[in-house]
Image (cartoon, rainbow, N blue to C red):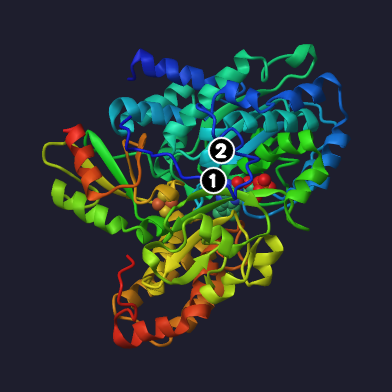
Amino acid sequence: MLSQESLAKIDRELTKYPADRRQAAVMSALRIAQDEKGWLSKETVAYVAEYLGIPPIAALEVASFYNMYELEPVGQYKITVCTNISCMLRDSDVIVDHLQERLGIGFNETTPDGKFTLKEGECMGCCGGAPLFHINNKRMCEFLTKEKVDAILEELK
Amino acid sequence: MAAFDTPVQHRSDKETLVCLRTLGQPDPASLQAYLNVGGYKQLQRLVQDKVKATDVITQVKLSGLRGRGGAGFPTGLKWSFMPRYYDGTKYLVCNTDEGEPGTFKDRDIIRYNPHQLIEGMAIAAYTLGARVGYNYIHGEIWQDYEIFERALDEARAAGFIGENLFGTTFSFDLFAVHGYGAYICGEETALIESIEGKKGQPRFKPPFPASYGVFGKPTNVNNTESYTSIPWILEHGGDAFQALGVPNSGGTKLFSVSGHVERPGNYEVRMGMPFTELLDIAGGVWKGRQLKAVIPGGPSTAVMPAAAIMGATMDYDGLSKAGSSLGAGSMIVMDETTCMVKTLKRLSYFFYEESCGQCTPCREGTGWLYRVVKRIVEGEGRMGDLDLLTDVSSNISGRTICALGDAAATPVLSFIKHFRPEFEYYIQHGKSMVTGKAE
Ligand SMILES: Cc1cc2nc3c(=O)[nH]c(=O)nc-3n(C[C@H](O)[C@H](O)[C@H](O)COP(=O)(O)O)c2cc1C
Ligand code: FES
């Protein structure tokens, strides 16, 4: 089940495509579902598929192909750090080490209080702002230093 | 949003702003800012005066505009491939999926000057007879996606997109859609699959999108920067755009400068600018260090040692003469402390991780390349590994449906070609010959 608000958002996405092409909206529908639920359970994916009138396997294929969908539970804040070349050249490893130390977790782990999950990401197309991470696939934080990371973690506490 | 998330970038008076020409105004992304620079006047003129499509295409051909997505295909020529008469809906697609490491120019277009892209797409739609357009935006840049959505709302409300524009029969609907973390979707046919709500696996070509694209209909795909150049070209004429650049490379180009420079960022300059001048605009190599190498157009273009790029100019011919290519204009700068072996390891991991798995040479080959470079970095390398890497790379190149395979091979071949002693040292000593850190 999804909230009325989420369904209204999916309906708006559907208006972007011909009426007989509801599958086209699956990318955004899964994104909207994940925004509401935090991650995509098998049930949520099946629900989205049913809502769009497509086979569940078609929605699952998409959910598992694209990296930003989460098929396992994640913390309240998922922090994805880019470690690709431009970020690596600007010492993304310092940011990664600092985050891991502050949070006490490694990549693909969640803090015991369920607050933070740490992920390693590929290039986000913002390399001029390296080093950087984004939070819950939405908020981009650039030109990071240890101090900025501390300030952001403080804000999310 | 906290103030420190995204500080505003430094600009230089050596830039020539075409695609980013609203910069400098208080709210550059607003409709008002774009109207202030003469925005939407070209669309209105073409539509109201019923200017012939062939006349528009002639100007685009004269402009020398080549596709800014990386392949450099002449835009005017591409537009002439779209079927003129077609009984049904034709589509227009904009590729804002940039995810090739070091590429971040299209992001600045949609967040600083989205209306010029919208006008460029509307002009293309008018010219090619497309009724519906999609701008496919990289999923990671959500805040910028929302800026673009707002710009679409503004343009719709002002009557620049939608039904019966300017009181004529011309209608064009334009929508924003997004990816969600798959580099391969930058490849145009994978992108089309993704718009249709599928996994991003490239299609065989032919048929090309011009005959079989979105929902199987004729579709024109261009990069963001390509479309955004169009309004300026029609305002000033194709010749004027060509004259901004050099022969064979018309116009301006947005260069994404990242890595070891003092002021990373996007700089829009005339094609043909000497490399040294562009480096200077970006503040030069950081911390007063020496330049070691540059990847001039993103990792799918060959790395160049400092000596090879110092005398080069930043345009298609200039960089190909110097041994690489312009690509998407994504200039990754590496200083003397950079370990080329570890850098190659990260790039090889990227291509391995992002291969869509459809073609065996790419799926297996990228994994193989990554594992061999990784074992060198871990001190387990063997002398034969360099030939093995070269061999595997050559066997991926040209044997896949899309160009990701070639893109994965290029860094391996060019890193080993130009920095072979560094790789040999690593294999012999089990450690980097560079003392600084670059990981
Ligand atoms: C693996 C791969 C990734 C690509 N990524 C992009 C991209 O992010 N943006 C882009 O415009 N073109 C990208 N391209 C090129 C597109 O396939 C296509 O050529 C381009 O969008 C056409 O627009 P243009 O002619 O205006 O450059 C990519 C190609 C490949 C093979
Ligand atoms: S390399 Fe990190 S955002 Fe591009």
Q: Is residue B135 rendered to the left or right of residue B131?
A: left
Q: Which residue is mark 2?
A: B109
Residue B297 in view, yes or no: no
Q: Residue at x 77, y 49 (%)?
A: B242
Q: Nearer the viewer, residue B358 or B257?
A: B257
Q: Which residue is mark 1?
A: B105
Q: SS for tag 1?
A: helix
Q: Residue at x 37, y 25 (%)?
A: A47
Chain under disc 2: B
Tell whether circle 1 marks a residue whose Cβ is less than 8 angstroms from ligand 1.
Answer: no
Q: SS for tag 2?
A: helix
Query: Dot 2: few (<14), some (14–19), or many (≥20) neighbours within 10 Å?
Result: many
| Label 2 with label 1: CB-CB less than 8 Å | yes
> Percent position (x, y) of residue B93?
64, 36
> Percent position (x, y) of residue B218?
74, 36
The answer to which image quadrant residue A67 occupies is top left
Q: Is residue B141 rendered to the left or right of residue B220?
A: left
Q: Amino acid at mark 1?
A: Lys
> Percent position (x, y) of residue B406?
58, 64
Q: Is residue A52 rendered to the left or right of residue A147?
A: right
Q: How many marks?
A: 2
